[in-house]
Image (cartoon, rainbow, N blue to C red):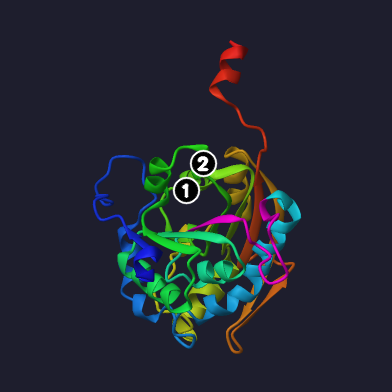
Amino acid sequence: MLLKHCVTSVRDLSIRNYSIKSTLSENEIQKFSKMANEWWDVNGPFNGLHSLNKLRVPFIRNGICSHQKSAVVNNSPTSPLAGCSILDVGCGGGILSTSLGRLGASVTGIDPSEENITAASLHANKMRLQNVTFEVNTIEHFQALNTSLSTTFDAVVASEVIEHVENPKFFIQTCTELLKPGGSLFITTLNRTPASLALAICGAEYILNVVPRGTHDWNKFITPGELIDYINSSGCQLRQLCGMAYNPFINKWKWSGITSVNYAVHATKSSQVVTDDFIQNLN
């Protein structure tokens, strides 16, 4: 069955008990697992993410095509990302994964919630996307299982995810370790400012009810400065930082010069590969 091809459920991970450093938040998993049946309701609590695809999909496509031409040598007008391998971290119900798959990319989506992965896989099965697969996994456990260069990716995407994890610096470092030299890292997230508290928390969750109350914790929002520090320390170089603005009344996003609430980042990993032989030759 195609569904079997689309999903790998790593049931023996002991995700909640393994000893390596973790990005996992139990509360976040439970929160989003409860809403797993609503990922593909375009008028439901995730309608803002469906609308966000109109910005983030071209942002990712253009970033890869501009900085990694060798990754898309097999592309065509209808499949501009053909030949490109992408890891979608914290993929949820697969809203972004499937859109990237429709552009021809080979996409692996991972999420620690089995309910989310089931929803993502069912939808990919409906769309007959054989180039999109899903796993129940965390980024650190996935990286521990995939340590060779042959299992690295042309791009790693974490869209609306880092504000829900523990140890965000470690999260970025682990994402980077799964990139090929020269590969792209794409992040979209929320800034920790009075404006984001007023608009993304008070306005969106408690006044307009655009998203369920308690979806976000303002204290876990990441400033652009913090994120750039994490990116630099992981061996990546910032390529683009853009603000994003959302109008909840018409469910529409647009690019903005202001990063005080939502923003997007594109960075690339250093193209230098430091091998064990190279290190030995320095000693």
Counting the numbered discs, the total is 2
Where, by quadrant of the figure, is residue 278 drawn?
top right
Q: Position of residue 175 (x, y in %)?
A: 51, 47
Magenta segment's dominant SS is loop
Residue 254 left/right relative to 52: right
Q: Is residue 192 above or below residue 176?
A: below
Question: What is the span of residues highlighted in magenta in the rendered image?
Answer: 71-88
Q: Could you give the CA–CA distance between mark 2 and mark 1, rounded to whole angstroms?
A: 21 Å
Helix, strand or loop at mark 1: helix
Vertical position of residue 127 compared to residue 73: above or below:
below
Camera-side residue of 70 and 41: 70
At x 61% / y 67%, what residue is drawn?
262
Mark 2 or mark 1: name the one nearer the start of the chain. 2
* Closer to the eye: label 2 or 1: 2
The dot on residue 150 is 2
| Coordinates of residue 113 in the picture (x, y in percent) | 33, 64
User: Which residue type carries mark 1?
Assistant: Phe
Residue 87 belongs to magenta span: yes
Coordinates of residue 269 in the picture (x, y in percent): 64, 43
> For this view, does 184 lie left or right of residue 95?
right
> Given the current orientation, which residue lies at the most extreme top position?
283
**Disc 1 marks which residue?**
171
Residue at horizontal 50 percent and vertical 79 percent from the top: 204
Q: Looking at the rendering, in which quadrant would you find the C terminus?
A: top right
Q: Residue at x 35, y 57 (%)?
A: 25
Q: Quadrant of residue 76?
A: bottom right
Tag 2 secondary structure = helix
Q: Residues within 10 Å of mark 2 (few under 14, many from 20)?
A: few
